[in-house]
Image: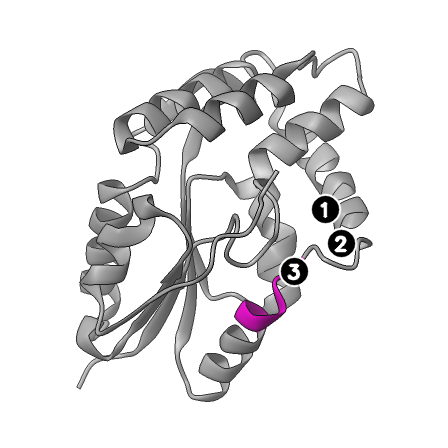
């Protein structure tokens, strides 16, 4: 008998915002000499609202990370911690029903795994807050601690979420038929259909 896991999308599923858009907006309002993202959040918001295919979302995801070319990873991580602390102060940052599911499944012995197109600096505070076991996410490339503007492999969106979960399940002896997955978007369907208990939650206005 294998291990059990519960896989969670993040944006609009655990938190009530699109993390990358929100972070871009935060950077706009808290400009520095090393991270400049003027008008990026509005651009992303408009595009996200129009996108309907995994391929288009993946292209947008790659474009997003290109803005960090030449930026120190440490600088982004520091800004991400400040962004998270500010967002957490809002009373509606977490989606209560999903948080309750995380706690329930943890108590029942499930491994909790995030599966998201977002990236590590925006996820680390969330992982710490809820004692998350693992995170499958998009990985922007770095060389010597500096972002190159490229993405390692494919953005963790749509079918790539399914592929990443399959790999994780194989590496960790996960019984997918006994596992759960939660998501709010059509792009989460490959992930939801992969497990025995796939839950499509009501979409949240995530901008």
Q: Residue 172, which numbered label?
A: none
Q: In this figure, which residue is indicated by the disc labeled 1? A: 84
Which of the image's four quarters has the N terminus?
A: bottom left
Secondary structure beneath label 3: loop
Disc 2 packing (10 Å; few <14; some 14–19; many ≥20): some
Instruction: Find the distance from the CA under tag 2 to the CA under tag 3.
Output: 8 Å
> Can the viewer see residue 4?
yes
Task: Point out residue 21 in the picture as x, y percentages from the top left corner.
Answer: 60, 31
In contact (CB < 8 Å): disc 1 and disc 2 = yes
Disc 1 packing (10 Å; few <14; some 14–19; many ≥20): many
52 falls in the magenta region? no
Task: Point out residue 187 in the picture as x, y percentages from the top left corner.
Answer: 31, 44
Instruction: Find the distance from the CA under tag 1 to the CA under tag 3.
Output: 11 Å
Of labels 1 and 3, the one closer to you:
3
Of labels 2 and 3, the one closer to you:
3
Task: Point out residue 181 in the picture as x, y percentages from the top left corner.
Answer: 34, 65
Q: In the rendered view, does 191 fall on the left or right side of 115? A: left
Q: Is residue 65 above or below residue 21?
A: above
Secondary structure beneath label 2: helix
The span picked out in magenta is 94-99
98 falls in the magenta region? yes
Which of the 4 image quarters holds residue 92?
bottom right
Which of the image's four quarters has the C terminus?
A: top right
Q: Residue 94, which numbered label?
A: 3
Instruction: Point out the tag, 1 or 3, that comes first from the N-terminus.
Output: 1
> Can the viewer see residue 142?
no
Instruction: Find the distance from the CA under tag 1 to the CA under tag 2.
Output: 6 Å
Q: In this figure, which residue is indicated by the disc labeled 2? A: 88
For image coordinates 23% across by 64% down, the residue present is 169
Q: Main secondary structure of the magenta part?
A: helix
């Amino acid at each position: 008998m294998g291990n059990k896991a519960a896989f969670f999308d993040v944006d609009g599923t655990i938190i009530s915002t699109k993390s990358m858009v929100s972070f871009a907006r935060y950077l706009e309002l808290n400009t520095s000499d090393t991270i400049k993202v003027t008008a990026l959040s509005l651009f992303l918001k408009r595009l996200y609202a129009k996108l309907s295919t995994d391929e288009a979302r993946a292209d947008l995801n790659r474009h997003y990370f290109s803005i960090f070319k030449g930026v120190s990873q440490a600088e982004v991580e520091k800004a991400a911690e400040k962004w998270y602390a500010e967002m957490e102060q809002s009373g509606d940052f977490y989606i209560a029903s999903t948080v309750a599911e995380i706690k329930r499944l943890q108590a029942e012995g499930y491994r909790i795994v995030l599966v998201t197109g977002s990236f590590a600096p925006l996820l680390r505070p969330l992982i710490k807050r809820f004692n998350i076991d693992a995170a499958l996410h998009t990985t922007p490339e770095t060389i010597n601690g500096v972002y190159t503007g490229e993405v390692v492999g494919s953005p963790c969106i749509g079918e790539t979420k399914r592929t990443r979960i399959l790999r994780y399940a194989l590496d960790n002896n996960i019984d997918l038929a006994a596992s759960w997955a939660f998501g709010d978007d059509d792009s989460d369907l490959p992930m939801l259909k992969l497990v025995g208990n796939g839950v499509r939650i009501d979409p949240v206005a995530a901008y």
